[in-house]
Image: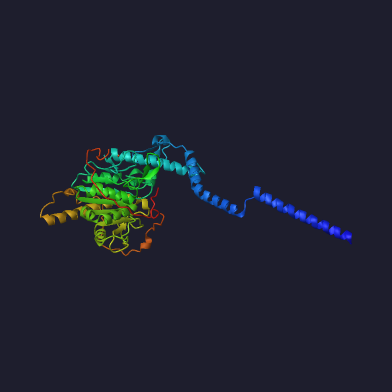
Amino acid sequence: MNVHLQIVKFRIHDLLAIVLCIISLNVILSVYCLPDSQDIMNTRQDRVERGNEEGPARKKSRMEQSSSSYQFPTTLEDFQYQFNEKGQLRHSVSGKPYEFEFKKGDPTYNQRRYEALGKIITQHIYKLLETETKLERIYIPTDHQDNEPRSFVFVSKNALTTRGKLLVLINGSGAVRAGQWARKLIINDCLDSGTQLPYIKKALEEGYEVLVMNTNENRGQDSSRRSVPIRKSSSPYEHGVYVWDKFIASRPVRHVAIVAHSMGGSVTEHIASKREQSFLKKVFAVAFTDSVHSMATLGISHNIKNFFAKHTVNWVSSVQPLDTPRPSKRPLDSKQVSAGTQVHAETSWTSFKSVFKFLKRKETELMTKERGQTGHNPGVSIAHDEDLDDDDDDSTLELRKESSDDDSQDKEIGQGDQPKGRSGAGIDISSSDEDTEASFDFQRYSEEL
């Protein structure tokens, strides 16, 4: 009996010793090795927060590193491309059109190469505006400070002093800049279809002065080489209103026509709504090419809607032949006719002749109205009489009849689809102004690049 009790006591002592050892070991581990549950939670939270903060930075760093690993030429000559006599981009050795898939199986490289070429193309078009059409570059804001980023517009010689007629060109969204309708067409088709050069040359022939907006030049680098918004031009809307105030509303020009493509139509609508009095006083016609403007926008007055219904036409992408009337979206809105193409980016080019026929017709109406009001020819003629009966194209624009064509035949375009204070010519450009900003869904119509 005593022997059994001693065995039991021995085992109890052993168990107690083992338990004490385990407890001691846990205490040692908790102090020197393992964090408690709160520490674990804090650590996890720190990692999450640090990941959120560092994630975009690391991603940007990787992108910059990836971008910097690609070295591309900086001139057309080094790219071994040139524009031939037809304005087509061709390889200077093989004579072949631009080949996007330069490196098989490397889409990132091919896209970066395309974008690098696009930047060169932009500078090339700027040069053509200055050499072929003799337009002058004016930097904005006109009161820019040293080391402040700036944008610019292009104007013809007498654009800021004329009392006659002025044609304003407004591009769409995306990578396109002043003088471009569609970069994709410039690279893959020709200069005529993708740039505004034909419009500028025709306008100058017709006696217009010209102003070319640059609505997508919205950011630049400050003195620290940081990307910052350009003052007075931080968005297409702000750019449009600033240019209107500075170079049109405050100038002596009496008769303004506008040609606006895609989102340029929305910029036009914004200018009209924010500067209604000067817009209605000066503008006699607006030609849209597949514009995205909407008279349903809040703040659009009845006077502006009525003006759009009577004095604007929108050449829309459609399967119908050129100038075929299309149903308008709402009663007080631009008349719609077919641009003769289903491709959004092509509409400015395919409707080119029709646009100028429309502008000439509106000029005739304006001249007739002015003669009726004064009893004699207006003091400033806005068109040469010999040009008013141009019959060089049988495809005349009919805007009087309404169409009941089934709109389902149309192609649906999907969603998501600088010297300070004075110009080089010595023209004073330092008058005061006010500007207005507005928001826009840039994903609605992204330019085909």
Q: How is the image coloured?
A: rainbow
The reply, left or right, for residue 414 in relation to residue 171 is right
Most extreme residue toward the left, as rendered?
375
| Nearer to the camera, 72 or 160 | 160
Looking at the image, is 431 positioned above or below residue 73?
A: below
Q: Measured from the top left, where is residue 442 in percent x and y?
A: 38, 53
Q: Could you tell me if residue 86 is visible in this image?
A: no
In percent of width and height, residue 167 lies at 25, 48
| Front in this rendered view, residue 432 or 140 | 432
Quadrant in the rendering for residue 4: bottom right
Q: How many badges with numbers are in the image?
A: 0
109 left or right, relative to 230 = right
Q: Nearer the viewer, residue 433 or 77?
A: 433
- Give the vertical position of 279 relative to 329 (above or below): above
**Res. 302 in view:** yes
Q: Quadrant of the N terminus?
A: bottom right
The image position of residue 316, as x and y in percent, is 33, 56
Where is residue 68 drawn, in percent x and y? 47, 39
Q: Is residue 121 left or right of residue 5?
A: left
Query: Which residue is found at the position 25% from the left and 45% from the top?
Result: 210
